[in-house]
Image: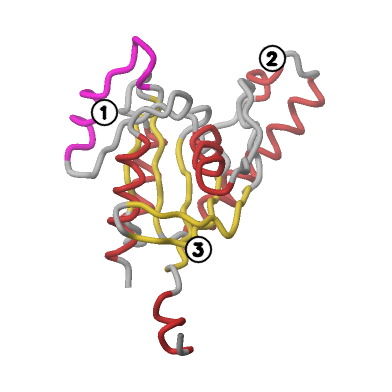
Amino acid sequence: MSWRLWLKSKPKSVNLGFYGEVNAGKTTLANKMGKDWADQEVGVVSEIPHETRSIQKLEKVNFAANGTKLDLTLIDMPGIASSVNPKDFMRHGLSASEAMERAKEATRGIVEAIKYLENVDVALVIVDATRTPFDQVNFTILGNLEHQSKPFIIVPNKIDLPEADVRLVRDAFCEYPVVPVSAIQGDGIETLYDKIAELARKMR
């Protein structure tokens, strides 16, 4: 194989960012993709809010779907929130000082995640399908993505739960691509992979 042909056949490199409100399932989905394509997880999952307080990455993920091969970097972002209340952490057993420090770290993580958007090629906006989608956090994320002309997919997660309402999410974001999944059960994951490949092919 000539070096010119080798360069042409290299998989496209794509930075895939996982954005969403706190505890929507971003890390669970990132870990699912990491295990599927690289046999590695990206981050730690916890019921305590803002477990992910700094950007976590898994690089050199050899992804292939819908006839497209990609060299993915999975970027799990801290959960976005309009405010961070230390009392939320104390309800999970953290001391007052631990809760205050976690709140500071979470706030820094939110700022870091928004700033890092300029380095993201494709974004997944994970929405908890058991909650109302009409949340200021979701609209803030989408506004930033549109402002920077970033391609994205809205991913209603937790569709395995009986209280999930995918139709409500579709109605709220009817002008955007929506792919429902269960990051834990794996439902809808193959469709999501195909959509990621489709968006990546359209990138310059």
- The x and y percentages for residue 39 are 60, 43
Tell me the distance, in whole angstroms, between the alpha carbons under discs 2 and 1. 29 Å
Q: Residue at 40% x, 51% y: name it.
A: 123
Q: At numbered mark 3, what does the secondary structure look like: helix, strand or loop?
A: helix
**Residue 179 image-quadrant placement:** top left
Q: Specify start and end residues of the magenta stretch as a single range.
A: 159-174
In the drawing, what numbered circle is on residue 119?
A: 3
- The x and y percentages for residue 180 are 31, 31
Total numbered labels: 3
In the drawing, what numbered circle is on residue 47?
A: none
Circles 2 and 1, Cβ within 8 Å, touching? The answer is: no
Examine the structure image and report whether residue 191 is included in the region drawn in magenta.
no
Using a 10 Å C-alpha cutoff, classify the residue at mark 2 as few (fewer than 14 neighbours), some (14 to 19) or many (20 or more).
few
**Residue type at tag 2:** His
Image position of 97 (left or right of 163): right
- The x and y percentages for residue 16 are 46, 54
Q: Which tag, 3 or 2, sits closer to the chain's start?
A: 2
**Residue type at tag 1:** Val
Vertical comparison of 141 with 11: above or below:
above
Q: Which tag, 1 or 3, sits closer to the chain's start?
A: 3
Foreground mark, 2 or 1, reads 1
Examine the structure image and report whether residue 163 is included in the region drawn in magenta.
yes
In the drawing, what numbered circle is on residue 92?
A: 2
In the drawing, what numbered circle is on residue 169?
A: 1
Image position of 200 (left or right of 171): right
Circles 3 and 2, Cβ within 8 Å, touching? The answer is: no
- The x and y percentages for residue 86 are 68, 24
